[in-house]
Image (cartoon, rainbow, N blue to C red):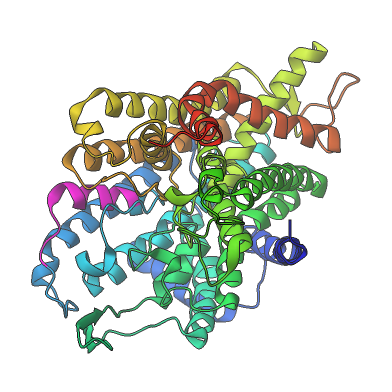
């Protein structure tokens, strides 16, 4: 373990934690309707949007109405993006004259970007026109992230309101998320990335002559504007197939650091926002502590796995970690850190090819996604995901002490427990059933390029990435087939809305409850003990659900590697 590696990792964590309070306080003011320094510029734009769309901003919604508005908005976005891909050959801003995207791939991509997954079964620079990238994919990067933020804020309102039948207005939450949070940071971030060498243009691709006299086409395009929101919104879809390993997306050590910070800064900051909105900062700190604890554990496992290397390679005379598939410009530490960051969040952006990780190193991103990506998680999705586990933890503790479980002064009853259980089980069942279907059918196994346990890991990763709305992949699986485009497409829909709908139901139920005074049997949810119980619940649920599948994939692959077995 090199000192410089530890120093780089600590620098990242220190910077991330330092940003939690200021960003979290700003988001609290935005959603609480308090004044911010951007109001003078954004208030007129917000009011214009409301007038054009005839939104009644003062009208609040019950959870069912909130959910209906969310579903209608997102599925209209899916349809528009699907049609844009089919018609891109007849539309402007297409200097390479790309033709229509085949329907099954267009469906998969539309679902992917609408659900904040950004799973890509295609190479962006050879498939999508500039218009599709800008007006389709980038727009969905904003609104899908804003949808996650809106659900998180609605849940917080449900936990804090007393005997209320409403949890807010989806249209207002969505608009303020885009205008006050995602857009300003993205504008500044894109300018910073351009200053570091990330390209931003509408020029046709360049054809140049190499030193050998061979022609080579260099893809160009509006990259910086998509790059920043794909990280900030924990989307992950790259303009280029190489994603953030491409020098036009991630050219310098500074951009590497800033892009990693962008991935986790809003999920981490939302814990502070949560503490402020429930009028108890300790509640937010407990959630953040559990997230950091789990993150460090998985980061350490991945780092150990990658620095130990492959003994089969070492036996040939090579020493040290294997750099195959790694980001050689930034070293093992930053490759491992990015891998852990992007799968702790529902991001999927990569600067390292996850398929090239050692079995132990590859276990980390796979397991983090399987846990529901509550270790920071996606924008908004991470907070409402971890709060689901908070409810389950409180319920378990209530059983232990023989009292009705309580959280934030409200009783956790059967309705909330059932919805929380559904929010955990639906993605898990989707992952396991989807993977089982793939390994049991010719259409599923025909796309696997690696035999043995690694092939199973590739299939597990694909369905985990879809259900967890992550978007990264083990690249040894050819997912651009009719079977995988449709199967993973439906997996992404179930993984997204199979969690959002139960969460909104919890928000609605909790909003209607009365506050209860804490009693002698009330378990405190503000200390280190509860943070440990919360982290333990996440790990135990994940282990009980997925260990048999993991044992047949990365675990047995790691043992075979140590034994000297190749396949």
Q: Position of residue 393 (x, y in %)?
A: 70, 26
Viewer-proximal residue among 514 and 332: 332
Quadrant in which the C terminus is drawn: top left
Viewer-proximal residue among 337 and 487: 337
Q: Position of residue 555 (x, y in %)?
A: 53, 30
Viewer-proximal residue among 310 and 57: 310
Q: Is residue 513 magenta?
A: no
Q: Position of residue 563 (x, y in %)?
A: 54, 31
300 shown above or below 554: below
> Is any part of residue 490 visible from this angle?
yes
- Magenta stretch, main secondary structure, is helix
Quadrant in which the N terminus is drawn: bottom right
Q: Is residue 111 magenta?
A: yes
The answer to which image quadrant residue 207 occupies is bottom left
Q: What count of labels does the image hold?
A: 0
Q: Position of residue 512 (x, y in %)?
A: 61, 30
Q: Residue at x 46, y 40 (%)?
A: 468
Furthest residue to the top? Answer: 402
- The segment highlighted magenta reads 99-112
> Is any part of residue 176 visible from this angle?
no
Q: Residue at x 62, y 44 (%)?
A: 375
236 shown above or below 39: above
338 shown above or below 62: below
Q: Is residue 288 left or right of residue 141?
A: right
The answer to which image quadrant residue 154 occupies is top right
The answer to which image quadrant residue 435 occupies is top left
Q: Residue at x 51, y 25 (%)?
A: 551
């Amino acid at each position: 373990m090199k000192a410089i590696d530890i120093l780089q990792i600590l620098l990242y964590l220190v910077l991330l934690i330092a940003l939690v309070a200021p960003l979290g306080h700003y988001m609290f003011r935005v959603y609480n309707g308090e004044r911010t320094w951007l109001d003078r510029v954004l208030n007129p734009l917000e009011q214009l949007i409301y007038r054009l769309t005839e939104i009644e901003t003062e009208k609040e919604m019950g959870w069912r109405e909130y959910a209906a508005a969310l579903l209608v908005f997102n599925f209209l976005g899916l349809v528009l993006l699907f049609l844009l891909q089919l018609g891109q050959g007849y539309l402007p801003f297409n200097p390479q004259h790309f033709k229509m995207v085949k329907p099954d791939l267009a469906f998969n991509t539309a679902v992917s970007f609408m659900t904040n997954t950004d799973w890509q079964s295609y190479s962006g620079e050879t498939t999508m026109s500039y218009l599709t990238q800008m007006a389709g994919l980038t727009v969905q990067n904003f609104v899908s992230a804003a949808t996650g933020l809106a659900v998180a804020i609605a849940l917080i309102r449900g936990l804090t309101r007393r005997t209320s039948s409403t949890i807010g207005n989806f249209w207002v939450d969505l608009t303020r998320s885009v205008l006050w949070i995602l857009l300003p940071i993205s504008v500044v971030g894109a300018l910073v990335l351009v200053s570091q060498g990330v390209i931003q243009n509408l020029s046709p691709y360049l054809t140049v002559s190499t030193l050998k006299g061979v022609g080579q086409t260099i893809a160009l395009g509006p990259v910086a504007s998509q790059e920043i929101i794909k990280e900030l919104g924990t989307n992950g879809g790259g303009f280029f197939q190489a994603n953030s390993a491409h020098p036009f997306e991630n050219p310098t050590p500074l951009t590497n650091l800033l892009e990693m910070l962008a991935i986790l800064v809003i999920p981490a900051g939302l814990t502070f926002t949560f503490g402020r909105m429930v009028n108890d900062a300790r509640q937010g700190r407990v959630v953040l502590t559990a997230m950091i604890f789990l993150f460090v554990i998985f980061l350490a496992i991945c780092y150990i796995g990658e620095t130990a290397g492959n003994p089969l390679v070492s036996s040939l005379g090579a020493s040290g970690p294997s750099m195959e598939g790694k980001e050689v410009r930034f070293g093992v530490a930053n490759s491992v850190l990015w891998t852990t960051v992007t799968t702790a969040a529902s991001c999927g952006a990569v600067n390292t090819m996850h398929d090239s990780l050692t079995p132990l190193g590859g276990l980390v991103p796979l397991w983090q996604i399987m846990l529901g990506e509550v270790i920071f998680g996606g924008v908004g999705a991470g907070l409402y995901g971890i709060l689901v586990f908070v409810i389950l933890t409180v319920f378990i503790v209530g059983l232990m002490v023989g009292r009705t479980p309580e959280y934030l002064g409200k009783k956790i009853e059967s309705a909330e427990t059932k919805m929380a259980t559904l929010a955990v089980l639906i993605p898990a069942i989707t992952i396991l059933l989807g993977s089982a279907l793939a390994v049991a059918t010719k259409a599923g196994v025909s796309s696997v390029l690696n035999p043995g346990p690694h092939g199973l890991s590739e299939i597990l990763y694909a369905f985990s990435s879809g259900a967890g709305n992550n978007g990264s992949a083990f690249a040894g699986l050819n997912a651009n087939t009719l079977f995988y485009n449709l199967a993973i497409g439906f997996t992404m829909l179930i993984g997204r809305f199979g969690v959002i709908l139960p969460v909104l139901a919890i928000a609605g139920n909790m909003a209607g409850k009365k506050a209860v005074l804490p009693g002698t049997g009330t378990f405190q949810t503000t200390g280190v003990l509860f943070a440990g119980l919360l982290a333990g619940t996440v790990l135990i649920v994940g282990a009980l659900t997925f260990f048999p599948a993991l044992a047949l994939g990365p675990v047995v692959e790691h043992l075979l590697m140590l034994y000297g077995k190749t396949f």
